[in-house]
Structures are given as structure tokens and as C-alpha cells.
Amino acid sequence: MRRIKSQADTLKQLLEENFKSTEDATFKTLDNGQDQIEMVYINTIVDNAKIHDLFLKPFFEIDKINKYVSYIKSLNDYKEYKNEKEAMKEVLHGAIVLLIEDEALIVGLKLQENSAVQNAMVEATIMGPQTALSENINTNINLIRHRYHVPTLKVEKPMLMGEKSKVELAILYDEQQVKPEVLKKIKNQLEQINEPIIQSSGELHRAIIQNNKRLFPHLMVTERPDRIAYNLSQGKIIIMIEGNPFVLIAPAVFYDFMSAMEDFYQPYWVSKFLISLRYIGLFISLFLPAAYVGITSFNPEVFRVQLAFSIAGSRIPVPYPSYIEVLFMLIMMEMLTEASIRLPKTIGPTATTVGGLILGQAATEAGLVSNIMIIIVAAVAISNFIIPINEMSFSMRVSKYLLLFLTTISGLIGLMIGTIGLIYYLVHLDSVGEPYLKLFFDEKKQQT
């Protein structure tokens, strides 16, 4: 009997060491006046509605503890206690541990949230999981815990955000992987926020980053539980806010914004090809409009003679310089993009597609833009949409106008100066102390 009691005491100590600092872990003591038992479980991944009927009510109705133990062992999901490691695994998969005198009883009570979960709309994949986060914090923690079963996953709910909105905030991190100085810095930045109303991850992002005039995102916004689980394993911190199906990931560097979860679900060389394709699209979106203006208006000798004559011939009916032509078409494309977002989903794609076709054809026939300009704008639009994370895509959309402005002033030299300036700006950025151009790679994944 002493050996079993020693195992129960060891299990209790292990559970307290791993879960005491976790907000969604519950340690409950029941006392009916004669006997006392302890319950340990993670409330975000168990069916809380059944706890009262299965455990609490019988404990106060059954007069003898040995009968209660027999009742627990008769439940369908009762599991024999093997060792502390197996018990810890069961708790992380939605089981309840009952410590009764000298025994440790384990009963499965797993809850998988599916009814309140929507399919991923912003970061869709072909072969990967299709579920996204919901607007309920506990549901989101449930989804993450079902993908990341480690006892070192900590959940903290340190404060309510917004002086007037008072929405709940949660911080998730892997205690074994996270850098303590990064975690401390994030908590300090959250404590310094004094905004009256915060309702979304985007607002929280702006509040955390004190420099509101930033061009590039310093934290990543995502809706995918699988991306969250992967980043937790990389030692990153997840910041959730109640009522929003998106979370913040910190720190986030440039490489993170160019990676999609599809990269992990495809064969190795297919994945590398897709990543290379994104960087090619990034360069096309960023540099093609400025390069077109710089070459056609300042340095046409860069092209071969046949191509230079072809471009010059297509621009004969255009009455204004190339930079006005480019700017006009880019602005119209931006308007079409915004219209497709704001219009109802049923008519948005059709209206913007038809509008784009009519606009391009009419502008060409009227001599307002050249044929080559239509090709360039289409290439830029398609290339911009290939960037997986929208915030980085928006930043690149703005950056290309800065390069276009410098090129308009001083040609290809301006483009070179703008490119060097952009790289210089990126090098001096950081995300919660991590260099922005640092590469985050999973070493174990590389070895495999």
C-alpha cells in the first residue's frame, strides 16, 4: 500500500510542477465531511458539462469512499494507472486525474471543439488542416492543446485589455523553448498599453509596437492552429484576445512572413520551389513598375533593340510620361483589390474581374496606356497576391510606390538607392529584440 501511495504523491507533485502556473489547469479538492479527494485536469480540453454529473454529484451521494472508487472504475473511459509519464500524457489529451487516498484514478473526458470552428479563409491550404481559430479564447486554447501535447505549454491570462472594452487576453508559450528575456519584454509591453478600446489583434499589434509609423509588421497575425503549434515549438509567444479569430505571434521575422504552412505538407523539392516562387513574385511586385519607368524613360539602351522598339511603338498613342501611366494603372488595380474585399462575397470576384477586363481593354483602345503596361500591372497584381501573409503583402504594396517615386526622379540610379535604403531599413528593424532579417529554421526538420 505504501508503494502505491508514494506513486500517487509523486504524480501529484509532478502535476503541480507542470501545471500550477498554467491558467487553464484546475486543481480541485472535494470534501464531504468524511473523505477528501483531489481532482486535476485541464479545463479547456475536457468536457466541463459532464464533470458535475460524473464526479461531483456521486462523491457527495455515495456514503463510502471505497464504493466511490468502484464507481469511478466502472466508467467507460476509466484507464488503469501505469506510471507518472503515462498519467501526464493522458492529462494532456483530456483526462481527469483523481487522487483518492493511496490511489490515482484516470478517467478520459476529452472535448474536441468543432462546432464553433470555421474553415481557414485567409491562409488556406490544399493538403493541410482546414480549420481556423474561433472568436472564443477557450475554444482556441482547446484547438492548440489538441495539436501541441507537451506539459511545458503554459497559458497565462495576465490582464484585461482596454480601459473601456476590458477584453480578456491570453499568452501561450512553451516554457522549455521560449527565451525568458523575450517573454519578459512582451509582458512589459502589454502592461504599458493604455488604449481605451482594443477589439482585434491588429489594434493590439499597433498598441504593442510603440512606433505607430512602422511600414513592416513586427508581429505575425495568423488564424491557423497548425501554424501556432509550429511556432510554439520554435520558442515563440502566442498572444490571444477575446472575440477575435486571429492571434499574434512574437517574435516574427521577414522569413516567417514568406512561409506558408503548405511548405511543410509538400515534398521537399516542391516546397523549395514554392518558396523560391514567392521570392520571385516578391521581386516582381516590388521592382517591376519602377524598373519599367527607369528603363523606358531614362535608360532604354538596357533593352535589346527589338524590345526597345516594340515598347516605344506601343507607347506612341500615350500622351503622358511612363511614370503617370504606371501610377494610373497601379492605383486602379489597388481600387479593384479594395473593391473585391468590400463587396459582398457573392458578387465581389465577378464584379472586379469584369471591371478589370473592361478597364484594361478600354484604356488600351483609348490610348491612355500601352499594351505592355497592362501586362506589367497584371504581373504585379498576381505577384503581390503570392505573399502568404497579408500584412507583408500590404507593406510591399506601399514600398513599390516609394521605389517608383525615387525612380521617377533619377531613373535606375534612384531605383538602386531606394533598394539599398530599403535593405538598410530592414536590417535595422527588430521584432521583440530579434533581428528582422534573421532566419528561423527548425534544425530537427533540416536534419530529417
Image (spheres, rainbow, N blue to C red):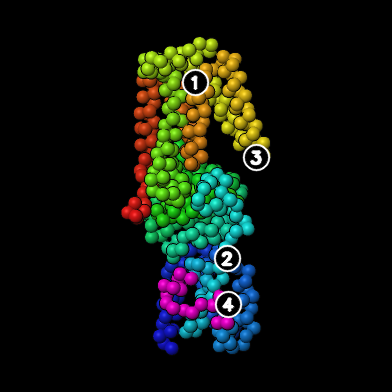
The amino acid on which the numbered mark 4 sits, given as a three-letter code, is Asn
Circle on res. 111: 2
Which residue corresponds to mark 1? 372
The amino acid on which the numbered mark 1 sits, given as a three-letter code, is Ile
The crowd level at tag 3 (other Cα within 10 Å; few <14, some 14-19, many 20+) is few
Which residue corresponds to mark 4? 76
Q: Is residue 379 above or below residue 170?
A: above
Q: Label 1: state its secondary structure.
A: helix
Q: Residue at x 46, y 16 (%)?
A: 311
Which of marks 2 and 4 precedes in the sequence? 4
Q: Label 3: state its secondary structure.
A: loop
Q: Label 2: state its secondary structure.
A: loop
Which of marks 1 and 3 precedes in the sequence? 3
Relative horizontal placement of residue 414, taking residue 355 as reference (left or right): left
Which of marks 3 and 2 precedes in the sequence? 2
CA gap, disc 3 and disc 4: 47 Å
The magenta span reads 73-90
